[in-house]
Image (cartoon, rainbow, N blue to C red):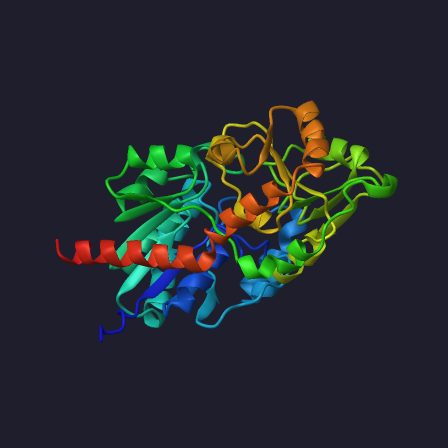
């Protein structure tokens, strides 16, 4: 009988709050915890100063109330603990000095007392403070999970992102989009492509129920789930609300005006509620806009869309071209509307192709894949 695998402690430097829309960061934390890792999920170190509407969330963080710092209460799996670092945004020399001289040493001492060895750090956040804290903690293995085109981040001020510094400080890089994978391979010697995945069983309610399909003169229902941020073509979303019935599930982070009066804006909801809210949709929509960072986007919900069995129409996502047989890809707004109507009348075999792709890409499979990459690279680093 082979011995049990060595227990590893994992510290995730996240770019997404735990109590926000459920994303890759959550699934990686939960999946590796199921495999026996002790997981500490570090809430995002800020990269900008908060706006007036975010003061409540800031107070929640200062008080150590993670639920108040987010938007919606998400489940917290066993073996996953939340921590936060009270840091200033790395937007100027004064805040960087304070972080470097006060915040980082203090956080390293506190986290160091809690974390075991071997320690693996999975870093999503290429900021000066996160790189400095990672170095202070001296992990046995450091990984950069590159799932965002940080040099073209629309939310960061110039000079804030320190991706080159992070790349120089890690032993392994993960990337999802083809563009990011190739860019990382040109910058680092050890890069693995790690796609998003899906909790397939969770989406059974969405598979069990179909939309109206326009029967009896009913208008088709489109559904979008996820944050409405800088990625989303908001003008197209507004147009869809007038062409079809539209349900938006997730926080609206950007101004969204002109929606049809019957549009459903449900805000952020716990992950467990999403499948039921998609169940009566005819078509799922991913109306992304063409922007500098778009080529690096693989939506975390890619395989979640497929797991519903429902057709999904997408625009502005070059990364989905390699899955063109599973999605309806549109080049512009007119093509998008036409694709929605075409998708609602598709043959039944298209549904099974999507479900099969989702079954081949579950988070249990992906967590085992990530665990394999970690252990293989950790053994190589130890053997140097």
Q: Does any portion of residue 318 appear in the rendered image? A: yes
On the picture, is 28 further left or further right than 227? left
The answer to whether any part of residue 59 appears in the image is no
Q: Is residue 81 left or right of residue 260?
A: left
Give the residue displayed 48% in from the left and 58% down from the top.
Answer: 27
Q: Position of residue 330 (x, y in %)?
A: 61, 27
Image point 54% across, 38% down: which residue? 155
User: In x, y percent, where is residue 174?
Assistant: 35, 46
Residue lying farthest to the left in this orientation: 384
**Residue 80 x, y percent position in the rendering:** 45, 68
Query: What is the quadrant of residue 12 in the picture?
Result: bottom left
Q: 63 or 181: nearer the eye?
A: 181
Whole-percent x, y for residue 77 in the image? 50, 69
Q: Is residue 174 left or right of residue 27?
A: left
Image vertical order of residue 269 relative to residue 312, above or below: below
Q: Residue 216's quadrant in the figure?
A: top right
Q: Nearer the viewer, residue 323 or 216?
A: 216
Q: Determine the residue positioned at 71% across, 38% down.
A: 344
Q: Compared to 317, does 245 lie above or below?
A: below
* Residue 224 sits in quarter: top right
Q: Residue at x 46, y 35 (%)?
A: 296
Q: Quadrant of the N terminus?
A: bottom left
């Amino acid at each position: 009988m082979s011995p049990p695998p060595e227990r590893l402690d994992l510290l995730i430097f996240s770019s997404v709050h735990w109590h926000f829309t459920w994303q890759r960061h959550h699934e990686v934390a939960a999946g590796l915890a199921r495999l026996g890792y002790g997981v500490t999920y570090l809430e995002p170190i800020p990269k900008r100063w908060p706006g007036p509407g975010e003061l409540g969330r800031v107070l929640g963080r200062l008080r150590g109330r993670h639920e108040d710092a987010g938007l919606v209460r998400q489940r917290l799996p066993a073996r996953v603990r939340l921590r936060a670092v009270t840091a200033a945004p790395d937007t100027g020399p004064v805040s960087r000095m304070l972080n470097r001289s006060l915040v980082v040493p203090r956080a390293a001492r506190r986290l160091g007392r809690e974390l075991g060895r071997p320690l693996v750090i999975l870093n999503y956040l290429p900021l000066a403070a996160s790189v400095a804290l990672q170095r202070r903690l001296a992990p046995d293995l450091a990984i950069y999970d590159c799932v965002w085109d940080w040099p073209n981040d629309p939310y960061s001020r110039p000079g804030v992102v320190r991706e080159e510094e992070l790349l120089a400080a890690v032993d392994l890089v993960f990337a999802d989009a083809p563009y990011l994978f190739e860019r990382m391979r040109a910058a680092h010697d050890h890069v693995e492509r790690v796609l998003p995945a899906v909790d397939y069983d969770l989406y059974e309610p969405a598979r069990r129920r179909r939309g109206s399909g326009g029967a009896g003169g009913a208008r088709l229902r489109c559904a979008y789930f996820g944050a409405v941020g800088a990625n989303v073509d908001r003008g197209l979303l507004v147009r869809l609300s007038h062409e079809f019935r539209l349900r938006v599930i997730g926080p609206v982070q950007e101004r969204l005006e002109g929606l049809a009066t019957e549009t459903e804006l449900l805000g952020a909801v716990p992950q467990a509620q999403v499948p039921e809210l998609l169940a009566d949709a005819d078509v799922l929509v991913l109306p992304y806009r063409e922007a500098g960072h778009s080529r690096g986007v693989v939506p975390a919900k890619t395989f979640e869309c497929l797991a519903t069995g429902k057709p999904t129409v997408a625009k502005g996502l070059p990364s989905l071209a390699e899955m063109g047989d599973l999605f309806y890809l549109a080049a512009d707004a007119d093509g998008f509307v036409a694709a929605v109507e075409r998708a609602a009348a598709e043959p039944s075999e298209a549904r099974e192709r999507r479900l099969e792709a989702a079954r081949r890409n579950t988070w249990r499979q992906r967590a085992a894949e990530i665990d394999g990459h970690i252990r293989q690279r950790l053994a190589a680093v130890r053997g140097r």
